[in-house]
Each structure stands twice: as C-alpha cells, then as structure tokens.
Image (cartoon, grey):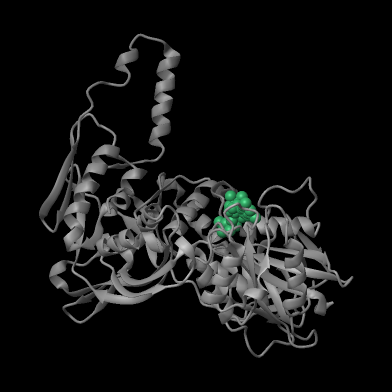
Amino acid sequence: MQERIRNFSIIAHVDHGKSTLADRILQMTKAVSEREMREQFLDSLELERERGITIKASAVRLFYEASDGQTYTFNLIDTPGHVDFGYEVSRALAAVEGVLLVVDASQGVEAQTIANFYLALEHEHTIIPVVNKIDLPSARPEEVALEIEEVLGLPAEEVVFASGKTGQGVEDILEAIVHRVPAPKGKPTDPTKALIFDSIYDAYQGVIPYVRVFEGSIRPGDRIRVWSNNKEFQVDRVGVFRPGSLEPTGGLGPGEVGWLTANIREIGDTQVGDTITLAPNPTDAAYPGFKPAKPVVFAGIYPTDTQDYNRLRDALEKLKLNDAALDFEPETSEALGFGFRCGFLGLLHAEIVQERLEREFDLDLIATAPSVIYRVMRSDGSIEEVHNPSMMPDPGTIEVMEEPYVRLTVYTPEEYVGPIMQLLQEKRGRMEQMNYLGGTGGSKRVELRYEVPFGEILYDFHDRLKSLSRGYASMDYEQAGYREGDLVKVTVLVNDEPVDALAFITHRDKAYSIARSMVDKLAEVIPRQQFAVPVQAAIGGKIIARATVKALRKDVLAKCYGGDVSRKKKLLEKQKEGKKRLKSIGKVDVPQEAFLAVLSAG
Ligand code: GTP
C-alpha cells in the first residue's frame, strides 16, 4: 500500500551516532535477529567497519507496526557524514521524502549538521530533528534542542530525544516517521519514471542499478529504456533490499525503492542520476538530475607491477559504478610508467579509493600526492587546466596563474578562536565573517567564515584544526572559484634525475620550507642503496634544498654468512616483502611513502 510507505534517510555530522541509530532501528523493526545483529549492520564494506565510518549510502526495507495498528514499509537509505562525501548524501536524498537530522546531545550543531540540513531543505524534505546520545553523562539535550531552533530554525518542540545506544526514544522516532514523513506520491498508471541512485556490479548478473520509482512501475519482463542514452534492456528480476541481501519481488510500484537486473554488461550504460522508463510507454521528462559530483582533487594511481595495468583499469571501471564521484583517465609518468590520473572529492575519498582498489581487487598500487586543479593563462591567450603538477607549462609562457579557493566555515567553542585564526592566517586565509551563535555558559559557539586556497587546507588542515580545539571545532567548505596566485612548480630530483611524479605546485613564499621538509622526508624514507643518493628540490634550474640518502655500509647477508640457512631465507623473504611497494626509479628504489612526502611537508 503506497500510503503506508515511508522513505527516509538519516543525516548527521560525522560520529553523531547515525550508524548506531540505524542499527537500533533495524533491530526494533525486527529486520535482523539478535543473532544476526552485529554492530553497524549497514556499513557492509569491510573498510567501513575498520575505519568506523560510513562511506557508501546503502538502502534497506523494513516493516514497522505502528501504534495505530497498521504495518508500515520503511525504506531507510543510509548516508555518509564526512565532508568528502556530500555527493553521496545528495544522491540518497533524491530518493526519499524525509530525513532524520541527528545531533549529538553533548556536541550540539556542527558544520555537517548545517550542510546536510540545507541539502535536505533544498529537496523540500520533511526534517525530523533528533537529539541523540542522551544517555551520555555530558548530554545537554534541552540546550542542544534550543541550539537547533536558533541555528537551523526548526522548532525545539519538534525535537525527538533518543539514544541509539540504549534504544531510549527510538520508538518515538519511528512514530514520528509514520506521522510526519509524507507517503510517496506518484501514480501506478503514469508512464514509469525511476531514478538510479546507486548501483553495483555483479560478475554473473552484470550491473545492478538501485532505483527509486517515482511513477508507474517496473516488473520482470518489462522493456526498460535509459533516458540519457536511449539504450534498452529486458528486465530479468526486480526486488527490494533486505538486511544483507537482495530479495526478489514481483515488481516495484510508485514510491518503492529497490533494484533490478537486466543483463546490463556495459558499466557506462546506467549512470547514477539517470532516469529509467519503459520503452513502450516512456515518460516525457527525466527526474531532475541531482548535482553531479565534480572531482576537485587529482592524483596519479599506478600499478607497482606494470603487468597489472589492465587489471587496474578494469577495477577502476567497476569501482566507478559504485562510486559515481570517481573520475579517471590514462596517464603516463616517466617514473611510474602507465597508470591513471584520478579525480576525487577530497583527500579521504582518494585514500579510500586506493584502499578499496587494493583490497577488493587485489592490486598493489603507488599513488602520487593529490593536487588541486590550477589554471594557467598563457601569453598566447589560451587557458589551460593543470591536473598534474608535472604538466605545468614553462613559466616563461605563463601570463597569469590561478589557484582554486574555497569558502570555509569553521564552528568552534569561543576559547579556540585565537589559535584557529592563527592557523587560517598561516594557510593564507582571508576572514569574511565571524558570528557568535549563542549557546550558554562556557559553550558559546563561534562561526568563522574564511576564503582560503583549497590547496592549503587539503593535507593537514582538518587534523590540525581538530588537535588545536581538542576535537571540538568542525569544518565544512564549498568551492569558491579561482584567484590569481604567485605559484611555482617545485621539481624533485632523486640521484640527479627529475622524478615527474614527485613534482608539486605551491605558493612562492612557502616553496622553500616545503621543499626543505620534503627532501628531508625523502632522505628518511628512501632505503639506503649501495651508493649515496642525493635528493634535491629545484625551482626551474635553481636547487633550493638538498639532502642525501647515505650509502649502505654492509651487505645484509654478510652477517649471516656461513650461518643458519633458514635465517638467511627469512631475511631475504622479509626484504622481498618490503620491496612490494617499491618502484625503481633509475637505479634507486623509491617506496610509496616517498610519493606522499609532500603531504606531511606542508
Ligand atoms: P559515520 O558513519 O562515520 O558518519 O558515524 P556515525 O554518525 O554513524 O556514528 P556511529 O554510529 O559510528 O557512532 C559514533 C560513536 O558514538 C561510536 O563510538 C558509538 O559507539 C557512539 N554512540 C553512538 N550512539 C550513541 C549513543 O546513543 N550513546 C552513546 N553513549 N554513544 C553512542
């Protein structure tokens, strides 16, 4: 029954307890038995469990017997909370009618609370504010409810108080979903219109798009058409999401959330955000596409073993299907050979992609340091985007160079404002606004708005902000266009050979200090060779920093000469293990760490 369907998402600042609450909801709707229940059920990627964060949005269908005696069908679409994954959030939100906005009762409103709130507002969704973790001794539920009213304009009396941990108040949340979130609209008799909000690849069944049906229906045997490319497929099976499995059903009607298989073999044929309709009776308008993800950070990814190039391409294609924000194209590096330049939403996204490629596709990879996109105006009037520092044109041909800026918002308790402003100054930030947000007693909160070069906050900014504020400050940012900057390319030479994959672009004023710590770091991480290896940094032809990797004194095996064979074998094996992630550049073996040295040099 369509009027008893409720589609909703949970949105929250990172660590405010979204996954724990989702688990509790699963348990209370008896979707999983106590035995099956393991912590953070929806975080099914191995990596998500290990890191304790939600990366991918996943969906599940639940049944809830409400106090009115009726059984409701809930489709819960989980979303990630980290600033890098805003795109996944907007994808999930396109498929629902309501959201639970979860706020930690001891932390209060934070940067992503606000960012996610505005995303939900843009979709005109019903928003149910939830003050969570009320079991914590440090919880200030009433205060946080007032803060929600003050900062977001949601009436404090609409707030539901709960604890995902103890289960207290979770029943109230479920009732609020029933009573406040509207049933989906859409007629079963209208031409079919379904939104692809995610998809996975299965070796046997091909691409499995995850869809939200808005109008009409999809059944096995239907001939579907993909809106953007007019490709047609015969539907094989359709179904819904049950915890841990894809359950086949007879069809999906308006308001329903589910999946389909149709022997779709080409990964590019069904893009996330596209609309599916039926070929015999197509809809006349696609679902208004949600904001496409735009990668803003680029890095090279190369197989350590050049033979793995095709496997890497295959893996990237499959991963992209599941991660629409990922972008890649082939690139070659003198130092690293054939690989791909990949675009990401941020640094965490880049790290996660590399880890997923290595784990899920069993690849050994070398990644270069992520870089932002610079813009170059040439003397001949042409404009060029530089995605890879080593491709920066000759400075002599450059008229103006521009770097991307972001509008950064930091929320912090008042006491940390001083050190945070100092950090932002060091990062070449320009203050736009400073607002006092209220709060009581010692918990007065301040909102700082800055414009700052994106490249400056890319690496260590978030960590430093957290440590400066003992974890209390939070941040959010959006792209703010390009501004002129006095930028230089720093080339790095190992054993007198320039290594293209180590080049980076930075502001002239910072080039010396970054180059200095970069060469020191390289000298530390490059293993000693039989000969001394000079490591240098240069701007143009001018060397600005140097360090040396000292020569090896002794042969590793010399120690065991004539000794125990098994020990010798072990030692050699250990060396081989260590080599896995080394890349030979000229005569020097360079480890993965070296390619990321610039990250810790900022
Ligand atoms: P992401 O998935 O990374 O966005 O985080 P999340 O918002 O899902 O947070 P998660 O559920 O992983 O919880 C974060 C931390 O808070 C964990 O250590 C939980 O054990 C703890 N936590 C979650 N809910 C509660 C609660 O109601 N009470 C208490 N005391 N702790 C909680």
Q: Quadrant of the C terminus?
A: bottom left
Q: Is residue 3 left or right of residue 503?
A: right
Residue 521, located in which quarter of the rendered image? top left
Q: Is residue 58 left or right of residue 310?
A: right
Q: Quadrant of ligand 1?
A: bottom right
Please, is residue 462 above or below residue 212 in the view?
A: above
Residue 10, located in which quarter of the rendered image? bottom right
The residue that appears at 73% across and 61% down in the rendered structure is 170
Please, is residue 67 above or below residue 244 in the view?
A: below
Q: Percent position (x, y) of residue 341?
A: 38, 60
Q: Percent position (x, y) of residue 171?
A: 77, 63
The residue that appears at 49% across and 49% down in the rendered structure is 355
Q: Is residue 180 left or right of residue 359?
A: right
Residue 45 shows in this picture: no
- Identify the residue at the far front of this view: 441
Depth check, front residue: 408 or 208: 408
Residue 43, located in which quarter of the rendered image? bottom right
Q: Quadrant of the N terminus?
A: bottom right
Q: Percent position (x, y) of residue 17?
A: 61, 57
